[in-house]
Image (cartoon, coloured by chain):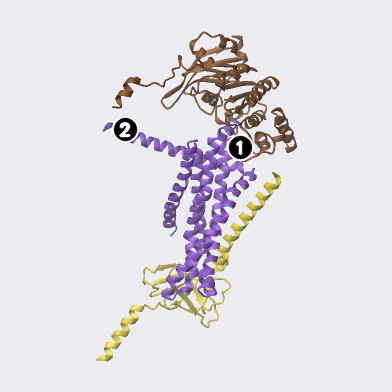
Chain colours: A yellow, B brown, C purple
Amino acid sequence: MSSNSRVLEISVGIFVAVGIAALLVLAVNVSNVGGFSSGQQYTVTANFDNISGLKARSQVAIAGVTVGRVVNITVDPVTFEAVVEMTIDSQFDEVPVDSSVGIYTAGLLGEKYVGIEPGGAPDFLEEGSVIRLTQSSIVLEKLISQFLFSQSDEDK
Amino acid sequence: MPETNNNLVRIRDLHFSRGRSKIFNGIDIDIPRGKVTAIMGPSGTGKTTLLKLIGGQLKPEKGTIHFHGENIPAMKTKKLYDVRKKMGMLFQSGALLTDMSVFDNIAFPLREHTDLPEVMIRDLVLMKLQAVGLRGARDLSPSQLSGGMARRVALARAIALDPEMILYDEPFTGQDPISMGVLVELIRSMNDALELTSVIVSHDIQETLAIADQIYILSQGKIVGHGSPHEMNQSDSPWINQFVHGEADGPVPFHYPASSYKDDMLSGR
Amino acid sequence: MFDWFAQIGKNAIEFYARLGKEVLLFIQTLLAFVPLVLRPGLIVQQIYSVGVRSMLIIIVSGFFVGMVLGLQGYNTLVDFGAEESLGVVVALSLVRELGPVVTALLFAGRAGSALTAEIGLMKATEQLSGLEMMAVNPVDRILAPRLLAGIISMPLLAAMFSAVGIFGGYLVGVDLLGVDEGSYWSQMQAKVDFDQDIVNGVIKSFVFGVVATWIAVYEGYTCIPTSEGVSRATTRTVVYSALVVLGLDFLLTALML
């Protein structure tokens, strides 16, 4: 009886440990939790004419390295611009205030992300800052129609 | 009646039905303390149901079942569970827990209901096993036991908590003559040695007549006979005669109720 | 005509009575969890028979499902030149859907049917009555530890299924088909979100654990105590569990999106 119940206890212990290990693998290796969401963050906003395709939880990157995430996208009721709210990890707290942001695409068919081009000002972005210099998402249809119109103009 | 105070269980005007069929139609039974009371009757007369009613597993439609002067059907669940600790029940199949050894089965009620240290539980279990003659079988699992041994283990388990009353559900059914003799001997000696009150439900006449102090005979929801084994043997009631002597036809007809034989055979044409 | 209406009414009353009974029994079982804390041995024993014994089938199935996902995903993605996203496809399918759902279905087949048969046979052999007559409530002693063990085991099993599946997808995708190892993991990490995907997957498997184990335990406890009754109850456990798990999966997915 006692050696039996010992085996039983050990196997249940292994079972629970393996299960929790699997959960940890999913949390850390698969979803990379703790990369951003756990640490200190600050929130900044930027206004864009067009954000086509950007979504909440899209990446925010400096030089291609992820430094934060988009948390919220709304429309300014007066100017009808898109207001993009994003959190940036506190370890990147020396981003100059005159940095510009743009919406780019990762690869031809990839996801949209927000890229920050650092400026040169001595002051840094902080909680609640608004980034003035923005470059909107490139809308492929507009680009093509512009190209076609300019072609037809040249033909005349 | 001076005897009433001596009764551990008093059943009055008990009614119970299952679906449409009436199982008990107003029966009165007294079970005296320290005696072996047998309740007999043909199969299907609800003898097992009666035990379940006494144990509070079923509730009657009408009537009272007093145990120690308290009405069992009216008890709250918690109270009922307390009362059941004073009863032991021996099921027809033994009802041993199949996932534990014989030893653990008998230790089970002790472990559930007492805080006794394991050493003491061991001693108690071995004492109970010794009483039924199966101390050597303690490490077997219930599936390794024969039917008679399983019933003896179940009996040891039933007396583990030193109950006041034991209910036996068909203890002799399907036993070979030797285990039958062992069980008869055990039931009688347990009853006398432990000052128990025993209730036996059975249709094995010879064995039951041999150990019972008094007998109730049930038929069609009524008590049709009551008395000592001797009185039963001498009874001139045709019904009791048919039952006690095992005659095929009599007040209880051989044929299940049906339309006339001749009509039935001709209607097939 | 009147009889017909009367029959409908009678059936409706019957239905509500059964539903009410089941809900009451469920609450009674949940309440019995409280005293169980003092007797961890009972739970450990049940986690062994419900969880540990299901571990092998869950891990092997997870491995195969992951490998299939790797193959199928690769063949579809390679047409778009997007085979780098294989890790995302495999991980998201497993963590959000296949992990919880397939685990619950396998659990119903492996552990659920065994639970129903065990409890049903205990009823048929009068063991449950025997417990009651020994003043031990079968709800506390038999149903509650099994339900709790199922609820604890299911999320752990689903996590194992997903983790092993992602590894299986990795073996096929990276070692066999030549997807870049770095992009398999990094794309996965970039796209799989902890709150949205992992936590929701765990919530799903928890809910499925409650439902699948409860169906198994309830069917066993209320079955007709004959060999035919037990075999029918066992079948019902597997069928009902599968239907309820798949239906609930749709509902939960809709709620979580």
Residue A7 location, x and y as percent? 67, 50
Q: Left of C84 or right of it: where is C138?
A: right
Q: Position of residue C206 (x, y in %)?
A: 52, 52
The chain carrying label 2 is C
Q: How far apart are marks 1 and 2 (CA)?
A: 45 Å
Pinpoint the chain carrying mark 1: B
Please give the label number shown on residue B97: 1
- Is residue C195 visible in the rendered image? The answer is no
Q: Which amino acid is tagged 1? A: Leu
- The image's mark for residue C65 is none
Foreground mark, 1 or 2?
A: 1
Work out which quarter of the rendered image holds the C terminus of chain B and state it: top left
Say if B155 sits above or below B249 in the image: below
Please state if B204 lies on the left or on the right of A5 as rendered. Answer: left
Q: Can residue B183 be seen in this view?
A: yes
Percent position (x, y) of residue B117? Answer: 73, 37
Q: Mark 2 points at which residue?
A: C6
